Amino acid sequence: MNPTIFVKMVLDAWHLKIKEANDIFNRVSDEQLLQEVAPNRNRGIYLLGHYTATHDAMLPLLGFGERIYAHLDDAFHDNPDRVKPITVSAPDLRAGWKNINAVLEDHFNKMSPEMWFTKHKAISEEDFKNQPHRNKLNVIITRTNHLAYHNGQLIFLLK
Amino acid sequence: MNPTIFVKMVLDAWHLKIKEANDIFNRVSDEQLLQEVAPNRNRGIYLLGHYTATHDAMLPLLGFGERIYAHLDDAFHDNPDRVKPITVSAPDLRAGWKNINAVLEDHFNKMSPEMWFTKHKAISEEDFKNQPHRNKLNVIITRTNHLAYHNGQLIFLLK
């Protein structure tokens, strides 16, 4: 079995869901981002920050380095929408989201297929021996599903 | 590289999203299923039928046999919600959804890891030579993302 094929399958799905998110963000104004996706649900701007914080946390998890957008966690990740004030502008959030995906992509491009099957940072060497599926590529699968889940909500911003 | 690990990664994600859907369906009454997930969006019952029709279509696609719930396509798959009348009861739809996932699971359990990397029925032998990532396991990845996307909407049925 050629691991390149499997890596391509997983990364193709990742790219598709990022494109889906970007296609929605490109169709909504900064003002529309302040609307809730449904009554009493998250606002678009919250999802934008939530996506960015989630993807940023992949940097240390995958061994790619320090976080860039950890300051977003409080408002967009560790608390529900509206609990903490949003102090970042929509254009800055849009730029951050674009940037974190580009930074991740740069790291992905340097990975050999075999490297994807090594352990991520949230599992011990010991546990990984018995659970080799908890590897770096598996992080991409779960984060793609996270994105798909919220894209299904974000699309409701469109009329 | 052991293909068993790839297969487990993909099937784990699939099972997780089916469980997520079931956890929501178990918490909503048949009456609540008739509500829209958001104003002017799909009703819960439409998503239930849509999921079932989509998973049912995987039977021929993966070479597992004839479809069981093709009669759901018109109301739940080929048309948006409310275009065609729903003539199936909520309890019957719930039973169908449970059954189709059990039928698929039976087939999955008979697959060797290598069989997952063979072509599905919607790609020609010729195209598959150049695009070996378009295999049976890839169908599970895309259908898992489909489920994740709509689960993000279905959850809005819960108060």
Image (tube, coloured by chain):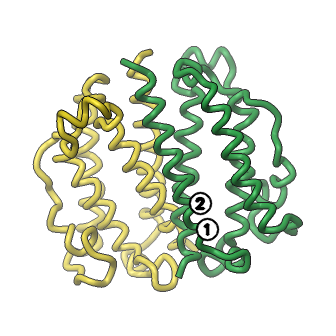
Chain colours: A yellow, B green
Residue at image x 75%, y 57%? B95
Are the residues at dot 2 and dot 1 in contact (C-beta closer than 8 Å)? yes
Which residue type does callout 2 highlight?
Asn
- The answer to whether tags 2 and 1 share a subunit is yes
Which quadrant of the view contains residue B23?
bottom right
Q: CA distance from mark 2 to mark 1?
A: 6 Å
Q: Is residue B92 left or right of residue B43?
A: right
Q: What is the x, y in percent for residue B71?
A: 87, 51
Q: What is the x, y in percent for residue B32?
A: 68, 79
Task: Please state the chain letter of the residue tagged with numbered disc 2 in the rendered image.
Answer: B
Q: Which residue appears farthest toward the left when viewing the image?
A: A66
Who is closer to the viewer here, A95 or A66? Answer: A66
Task: Look at the picture and state if B2 lies above or below B11.
Answer: above
Report if residue A99 is visible in the image: no
Q: Is residue B89 left or right of residue B57?
A: right
Q: Element under label 2? A: helix
Which residue type does callout 1 highlight?
Asn
Task: Please state the chain letter of the residue tagged with numbered disc 1 in the rendered image.
Answer: B
Q: Element under label 1? A: helix
Which quadrant of the view contains residue A35?
bottom left
Residue annotated with mark 2: B22
Q: What is the x, y in percent for residue A16?
A: 47, 45
Residue at image x 24%, y 79%? A86
